[in-house]
Image: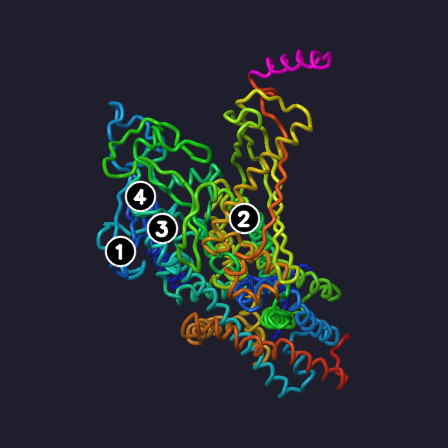
Amino acid sequence: MRLDGYISARQATLFIWFTILPTAILFLPQMLAKKSQQDAWLAIILAALPALAVSACVYLLSRRFPRQTLWQMLEFILGRPLGRFFGFLYVWFFLHLNAVVVRQFGEFLTTAVMTETPLLVFAVTITAVSIYAARNGLEVLARAMEFIMPLMVFFMMAVLFLTAPEMSGRHLLPLMSRGWHPVLQGAFLAAGWLGEVVLLAAIVGFINPPEGLRSSILFGLAGTLFFLAAVTIGSIMIFGAAETGRLSFPAYSLARQVSIGEFLERIEVLFMAIWVGGVFIKITILLYVTATGLGTLVGLTDYRPLLLPLGALTVALSVWLHEDVTHLTNYILRVWPSWSLIWEMFLPALFLLLSLILDKKGEGA
Amino acid sequence: MRAGLFLKAVVLLFLLLPLAGCWSRREIDALAIVGAMGLDDVPGSEDLRLSVLVVKPREVGGGPTMGGRGGGGGAPTRAPAEIFSATGADINEAIRRLETQVPRVLFWGHSRALILGEGFARRGLNWLDWLSRDREVRENIPLFITSGEARRVLELPPEVEVLPGITLIGILRNKVALRVDLKDVLVMLQCRGDAPVLPRIELLDKEEKSGSPGGGGRGGQEAAGSVSGGSGETGPAGIRLNGSGVFKEGRLAGWMTNDETLGLMWLRNEVKAGAVTIPCPRHRREQLSFRIRRSRTEIKPEIKGGKITFQVKIRTEGDLAEETCSEVYDTPRKLAMLEGLFAGEIRGRVEKALARARQLKVDCFGLGAALYRVYPKYFLQVAERWDEEFTRAEVKVQVKVDLRRTGMNVYPIQSQKVLERSATKKPSSGAR
């Protein structure tokens, strides 16, 4: 399949940011606070190590196979049949991930904002918009990121600054009162999320100039970690670890806490609106990657016809996979970290190792 | 080409449908806006009683001043709100029953206060779950407790502020009383080595409110004497925040007086404004007041030989706000003496609060939490019996007061005479 378009190194940075942050910011703080209590932020910092390992794999693979997507690399390394087999598995993994993201999006809106609207409505509408966005290709998507990112940053900073008077550093102490174990548990959970940076492998070939990749990985991960940690620390400093672990959406509750002089308040709906923009990007990224991957594997000339059926499949999966929100959170807590790390860390590392052992290189490496 | 145009037209026509507006929209004239909530127990039953104050926007419309209404001096105005009340096994059941009485959809997002009745508070705070679970109720609504029925507080007639919830928020904004929001209660409840305290609302009858005999004395607060308007035969004429209710294991365990509550606020680092009044050192019947501008409390736990000591350091600064005696405090040394007296008064309040908490066997200051922050392992060992340990722990209170400024005048009113008297005395004493 012929894919054209280039994204700059800065846009690749945003790509990483939007791949991880939108859902992580809303769902991770609660889970981390439950697992690691007041040391949740330590867990996030620790989880940076596996995330760095994942992106190092992607980086090294891209050095060996310049201007190639994940699926092309797989065929090079493993040969045609095996490479395609793993390629299909990766398409499935990303499709599945997208279904979970769509589901989380819907669950949040039906829980916190529009309780009477059926989940399906949110799933269908956001996917429809994402299909439209993905049709326009990577360059347009990258420009949409550049537009939405400052809004998200502004609102997250605004919420954190405006709630600062209520914050208390005492909630962060004592450090590691129950030893390393809870911190490691939290780090494992966060690693599954931060490892989503593996999506970069699917578009790494379009980054121009390719030398910019290293800095975009570093800045992208640093930005993601910063905002994830800031929101987690902010929630814990306001609500304490116990209450943060009890709230469904600490970040949203944090935005609800903003009350300056009784006129600058109730801004959480604005926060939610911007957040919807972020999730829209994340879903579009996943949809684009899934469609281009599948298109490459089956040898289509254009990925666009795949978007609608894949989107429909995503919506159906998002509804079918999980019975209720308890099932969803249980899945994320118990299954997702180990399941996702297979695809995010174990397999990429294996592929990298194979390409080194078999001494396989792409053209121009 | 034709077909494409037709298709576009059909799509556009379908887009007209959502233009009618949101699906589950609720216009303001279909809402019953809850201004305040009260929770009571039902004596002789396991049920609870939920009372809500539903705002009547038409009556509140004129703004908080209620300008021009009534006309003939103090004629009773129409109530700006209506109280509905229903019982139920839990809050949700009570709400469902309320919905059979209220002609509109109840909207909770604008509740400004939640008042717990004494009987309800004794049953426990686990009922608060609904408040944090519901998406409309906000985490920053303040909670209050009243000795008696919470419902009665809602009956407060419209005065300076039209609605009781706004009145309570307004009083809290003066920053003199303890403010505890829903969020704070949830945090304190879940924190080991801490316990919730809620400010207590006291209902005043007409005489108490407008400042007839009674009350008075130091520490007693009197509401400003205003001309009471409404007839208010059954309801209270006014309210004041006086003291607090202390919870142990989520249930109301006892009360603190106003002085004890002030001491508690010092210990909890909740003092942001206020005043401390002491008798003049030379003339016991005259008074001196210190107005607090800033204050900071630090608690440092220490463990020595199995004995827990809390070093409490209170640093506060402010201005000399009032002096009715004519003593002159114009040198650093004299000022230091005065600061010491104020510090002593503050320490006294803190000690009082500590004594009451020890008597109730509740650590309502978060001392245990402070211990946990520094000695987590040690605290986890004693966490189960912390309330016992707390009564044995020693609390050393150190207060430092800085009188920074003296206000718009330097000397008290009659000070010139005093100064002249001492000026004429001195040479004579020197000559002797």
The reply to whether callout 3 and callout 4 are in contact (CB within 8 Å) is no
Do the residues at discs 3 and 1 belong to one chain?
A: yes
Distance between the alpha carbons at the discs numbered 3 and 2? 22 Å
- On residue B116, the disc is 3
Q: Earlier in the sequence, mark 3 or mark 1?
A: 1
Q: Chain of mark 1?
A: B
Quickly name the residue at label 1: B42
Q: Position of residue A365 (x, y in %)?
A: 77, 75
Do the residues at discs 4 and 1 belong to one chain?
A: yes
Q: Earlier in the sequence, mark 1 or mark 2?
A: 1
Label 2: which secondary element: loop
The reply to whether callout 3 and callout 2 are in contact (CB within 8 Å) is no
- Give the overall secondary structure of the magenta segment: helix
* Amino acid type of the residue that numbered disc 4 sits on in the rendered structure: Leu
Q: Chain of mark 3?
A: B
Label 4: which secondary element: helix
- Is-magenta flag for residue B418? yes
Q: Earlier in the sequence, mark 3 or mark 2?
A: 3
Instruction: Name the residue: 53% across, 67% down.
Output: A34
Q: Earlier in the sequence, mark 2 or mark 4?
A: 4
